[in-house]
Image (tube, helix red, strand yellow):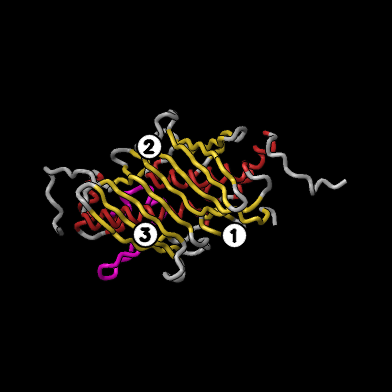
Amino acid sequence: MSTAETLRAALAAQDYPRVIAAIPYARYLGLEVAVHDTTRTYCLPFRQDLVGSTKLGALHGGTVAGLLELSMQLDVLIAETQLRLPYPVDFSVDYWRSAASRDLFCRCRLIRSGRRIAQVQAECWQDDPDKPVAFARADFLLRAVDVSAPAPTHR
Amino acid sequence: MSHDAQPIDKRDPAVRAEIARQFNTRIPHNGAIGLEILDVAGEIIVARLPYREQFLGDPVARLWHTAIGTTAADSTCGLAVLLALPGMETLATLDLRMDYLRPAVADAALIVEAECHHVTTAVAFVRATLHQGERERPTALCTAAFMRTGRSLFQ
């Protein structure tokens, strides 16, 4: 199965672990998604090899940014039922607190989704959502979907 | 006579190479992804991230995920700042922005060239270019700001 077909089937079944499994880098980081009603919370389970400073035991800034960017990308993918990964045009992250040796959670806000561009924000935290570790924003290019392919059934 | 108080001569290529080696080994995630520091002799710090299947974002189109470039950029920018400062102090990434100009393709390494172009008493500013061998065809551009903590790396 191609990536598009895998994504279509997994999205139709709302099988988000399978969506993540289709993206090697998301799989490598160990990204997870939890869905409660309409709220999707993404999680980067702590792993020693994601650490950026042995002295502080802090997560690497790049892994924090990775969770933020992947979460926003997946959130656009799920909301738009795109058959291809929304392609990041640009991404920026503000680091507000250092991330300790614990799981990191992320929630996204889809600000605007047009015909070609989706604009998203995200925040991540560890113990308390009111004490965010980092904030990010990104623009994603929504590529044309193969029109000959059948539309996803859950749309 | 004690040599403890002697400032580190960061113009010395051997000293710069040793700082880079220690910097890279102190960051577990750099080791996990296999980031190599190639050149620290000049003002432009060059690092290389060899290709791995697990870095792909789209395994069918065989393109790197953009977010792994952010991790490589964060680490390389941090090293560029450390080598531009007079002493050895702890740094914190304040913010970082990526512009994804073109996709990075599988089977080829990702090169990061980072330059710390301005330092104040509190903040250091860095820019980086990511490419796959042709500097004039960047896959991404990065700008970042790092906060100087004033705290010694060795305390």
Q: Residue at x 43, y 38 (%)?
A: B51
Report the residue marked by disc 3: A122
Q: Are marks 1 and 3 on the same chain?
A: yes
Which x, y percent locates residue B59?
32, 42
- Magenta stretch contains residue A83: no
Q: Distance between the residues labelled 1 and 3?
A: 25 Å
Per the model, the C-alpha gap separating discs 2 and 3 is: 24 Å
x and y, in percent, of residue B18 in the image: 67, 40
Same chain assignment for discs 2 and 3: no
Quarter occupied by the N terminus of chain A: top left
Label 1 residue SS: loop
Q: Is residue A39 magenta?
A: yes
Identify the image quadrant of residue B58: top left
What amino acid is found at the position of numbered circle 2 in the picture? Answer: Ala
Q: Mark 1 belongs to which subunit?
A: A
User: Along the line of sight, which residue is nearer the eye, A87 or A83?
Assistant: A87
Q: How far apart are marks 1 and 2 (CA)?
A: 32 Å
Mark identifier at residue A56: 1
Task: Identify residue for label 2.
Answer: B104
Residue drawn at 36 percent across, 35 percent down: B105
Q: Which chain carries label 2?
A: B
Please tell me whether mark 2 or mark 3 is closer to you in this view: 3
| Residue A3: quarter of image | top left
> What's drawn in magenta, residue-wise?
A19-41
| Vertical comparison of B84 with A38: above or below | above
